[in-house]
């Protein structure tokens, strides 16, 4: 994060205790829960797992911990889909709305738990009829439509781990993820809608499928239809509606071992290759069910809206598994926040009388910029709780959210967590915690975090350091698919026996945590994780590029933007046209989220004597700071020249 932003955080003194009315009705309002959970965290989680989930068979041991490998609820049998759907249809919830879907061109659909039960079973039957078996990986590349959720739950039902790939990713990114997971089936749609345009999912998939030998079957949901035709390869590609039309209406949930893989989700790390984060069944379901219930204070009457895409972990844990396990009613929205107009979110809140809204700081900053006239056009009085996730929220955005969306009455839960942690880790509990704008406050009950220096010693209050989690938790990742070494290396080597998050943080005098952003080569663009090396590989893949170094730079709306320092090959002209070509090239290779905001041409890059690019200095240059220590550089003149050139370019 920016030094100026950090300074602002250090001066933040406003506090917001929960109102008495909110406190009284909250799912959890007893502050002693923190101590009680800390006294025996294993017993705490075991009790939650037993109370919150339905198990086909009880477990024998709550935790087996051989760092860095944890097994939770060992020997227990359950099914995630059964917990999200079947157990609700036995009750009055059969006729309760599970999903309220708002599609972009005005399409809407409501699926009750009963509908979900039927549709999931039909699709699960269809998957089985195509030969998908327990343990087979199924890739899902879908727009934000109910079928994305149905496909995920159907996979969970038959024990076939899903790997959802965000619909904004490119064909190449899709192919890489399919190949790494060795997925057997792909579920996609002809297209999706975004800002009135068709996102050509099947066409992208076709490009990917040329390089994905493991895929035997492709299932295509017809979202667009009409004149929009897609290529269907005989024997391989099937229409969703053909398969499900006559599929058996019942398909019993597979009893899964607590430690059986529920899903893979690829995320960016410090190297160019995305990593397949593994989540298993019992621990993950315990983590997301409890956090959804306590952090969002979910009640049967709530209309809950998480604006994330199911392609990210936030969608997995807090659109699908956490809320549905609690029997909640969830809004699912297909489009963009500014289409057809900038009041789209507020129109949806008003239309469905949403009570809980969970979104990202980048969206809030965009809303702030657009102005409060947009939320003011709508009745937002149904809202009772607001959430934030994905990146640090700056106090100004927090206050704007509080005043203009929450009407000054809604608690805000700023939730810190990661794809790897599976569930929310540091967060207020809305009926207990006095919040401070910009602070994620305290670890959730049963979670233990610390801030360490390079030597692994805890830092004093108000000092920055590395955020670590010091004891295992049920929803922690069980590792990286096919790469155990990288798992140990990335998360468990810096501080023995403790999970290294890759984030910097500090604690204030009250013990509140303030997140300071990533300390590794991961950048966070609009709440989406990108690795600098991923973008660098995409750039050097272009024939004009000899070498590239990518850094995250401060961006008013996106939190971070992408800046690329590029050395062009002989024979190419370093001009604006090439800048645009390269931006487009990266967007096409990875996805629009990775498109660089700035391309800075340079003759050389600052390197250490051992040849390592010094990104820290590039950040200093790009953000106009005084240059840090340059003594380790092979040639200090390079960076000085670059700085002068950059300052010249900016004017
Ligand atoms: C960042 C998203 C500050 C952080 C759930 C983390 C946050 C990365 C917050 C994980 C927050 C997420 N405050 N930073 N409330 N939430 N982050 O895996 O840097 O997509 O390491 O998971 O987002 O991103 P991921």
Image (spheres, rainbow, N blue to C red):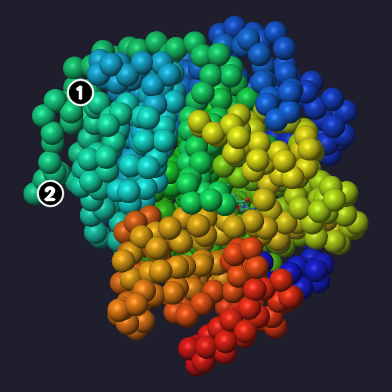
| Element carrying mark 1 | helix
Residue 28: x %, y % from top left? 74, 35
Marks 2 and 1, how far apart at CA: 20 Å
Proximity of marks 2 and 1: CB atoms separated by less than 8 Å: no
Q: Is residue 256 or residue 444 the one in the foreground?
A: 256
* Apparent side of residue 538 relative to residue 292 in the rendered image (left or right): left
Residue 77: x %, y % from top left? 57, 11
User: Which residue is the site of mark 1?
Assistant: 243
User: Which residue is the site of mark 2?
Assistant: 228
| Element carrying mark 2 | loop
Q: Is residue 520 above or below residue 2?
A: above
Residue at x-position 18% and y-position 28%:
236
* Apparent side of residue 76 relative to residue 506 in the rendered image (left or right): left
Residue 132: x %, y % from top left? 32, 19
Q: Residues within 10 Å of mark 1 (few under 14, many from 20)?
A: some
Q: Residues within 10 Å of mark 2 (few under 14, many from 20)?
A: few
Q: Is residue 607 above or below residue 162?
A: below
- Inspect this view and state whether residue 373 appears: no
Residue at x-position 86% and y-position 62%:
462
Q: Is mark 2 within 8 Å of ligand 1?
A: no
Residue 386: x %, y % from top left? 60, 52
* Apparent side of residue 175 relative to residue 30 in the rendered image (left or right): left
Q: Is mark 1 within 8 Å of ligand 1?
A: no
Q: Is residue 196 or residue 181 the one in the foreground?
A: 181
Residue at x-position 59% and y-position 57%:
521
Q: Is residue 253 or residue 588 the one in the foreground?
A: 588
Lower sequence index among marks 2 and 1: 2
- Inspect this view and state whether residue 384 appears: yes
Quarter assignment of residue 209: top left
* Apparent side of residue 238 relative to residue 491 in the rendered image (left or right): left
């Amino acid at each position: 994060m920016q030094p100026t932003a950090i300074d602002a955080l250090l001066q933040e003194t406003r506090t917001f205790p929960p109102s008495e009315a909110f406190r009284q009705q909250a799912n959890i309002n007893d502050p002693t829960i923190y101590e009680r959970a800390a006294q025996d965290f294993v017993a705490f989680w075991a009790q939650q797992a037993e109370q919150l989930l339905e198990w086909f068979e009880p477990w024998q041991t709550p935790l087996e911990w051989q760092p860095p490998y944890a097994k939770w609820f060992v020997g227990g049998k359950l099914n995630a889909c059964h917990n999200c759907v079947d157990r609700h249809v036995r009750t009055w919830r059969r006729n309760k709305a599970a999903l309220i879907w708002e599609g972009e061109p005005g399409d809407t659909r409501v699926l009750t738990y009963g509908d979900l039960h039927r549709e999931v079973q039909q699709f699960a039957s269809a998957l089985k009829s195509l030969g998908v078996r327990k343990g087979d990986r199924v890739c899902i590349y879908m727009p934000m439509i109910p079928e994305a959720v149905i496909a995920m739950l159907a996979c969970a039902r038959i024990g076939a781990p899903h790997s959802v790939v965000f619909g904004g990713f490119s064909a190449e990114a899709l192919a890489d993820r399919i190949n790494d997971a060795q997925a057997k089936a792909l579920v996609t749609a002809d297209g999706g809608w975004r800002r009135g345009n068709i996102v050509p999912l099947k066409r992208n998939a076709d490009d990917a499928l040329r390089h994905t030998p493991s895929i035997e079957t492709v299932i295509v949901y017809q979202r667009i239809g009409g004149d929009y035709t897609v290529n269907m390869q005989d024997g391989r590609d099937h229409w969703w509606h053909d398969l499900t039309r006559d599929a058996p209406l019942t398909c019993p949930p597979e009893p899964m071992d607590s430690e059986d893989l529920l899903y893979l989700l690829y995320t960016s790390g410090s190297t160019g290759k995305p990593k397949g984060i593994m989540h298993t069944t019992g621990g993950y379901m315990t983590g997301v069910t409890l956090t959804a219930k306590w952090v969002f204070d979910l009640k049967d009457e709530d209309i809950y809206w998480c604006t994330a895409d199911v392609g990210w972990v936030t969608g997995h844990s807090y659109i699908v598994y956490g809320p549905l396990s609690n029997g909640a009613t969830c809004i699912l929205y297909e489009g963009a926040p500014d289409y057809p107009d900038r009041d789209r979110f507020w129109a949806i809140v008003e239309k469905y009388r949403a009570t809980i809204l969970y979104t990202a700081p980048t969206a809030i900053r965009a809303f702030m910029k657009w102005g409060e006239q947009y939320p003011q056009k709508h009745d937002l009085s149904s809202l009772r709780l607001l959430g934030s996730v994905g990146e640090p929220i700056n106090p100004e955005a927090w206050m704007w959210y509080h005043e203009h969306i929450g009407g000054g009455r809604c608690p805000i839960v700023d939730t810190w967590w990661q794809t790897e942690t599976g569930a929310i880790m540091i967060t207020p509990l809305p009926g207990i915690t006095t919040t401070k704008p910009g602070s994620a406050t305290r670890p959730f009950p049963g979670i233990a975090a610390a801030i360490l220096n390079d030597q692994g010693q805890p830092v004093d209050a108000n000092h920055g350091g590395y955020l670590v989690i010091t004891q295992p938790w049920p929803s922690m990742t069980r590792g990286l698919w096919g790469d155990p070494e990288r798992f140990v290396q990335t998360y468990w080597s810096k501080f023995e026996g403790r999970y290294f998050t890759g984030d910097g943080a500090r604690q204030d005098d009250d013990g509140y945590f303030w997140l300071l952003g990533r300390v590794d080569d991961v950048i966070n663009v609009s709440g989406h994780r990108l690795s600098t090396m991923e973008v660098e590989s995409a750039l050097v893949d272009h024939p004009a590029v000899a070498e590239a170094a990518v850094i995250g730079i401060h961006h008013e709306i996106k939190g971070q933007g992408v800046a690329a320092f590029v050395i062009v090959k002989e024979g190419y002209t370093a001009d604006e046209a090439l800048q645009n070509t390269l931006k487009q090239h990266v967007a096409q290779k990875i996805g629009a989220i990775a498109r660089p905001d700035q391309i800075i041409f340079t003759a050389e890059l600052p390197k250490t004597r051992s040849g390592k690019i010094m990104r820290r200095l590039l950040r200093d240059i790009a953000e106009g700071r005084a240059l840090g220590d340059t003594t380790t550089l092979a040639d200090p003149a390079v960076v000085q020249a670059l700085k002068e050139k950059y300052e010249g370019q900016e004017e």
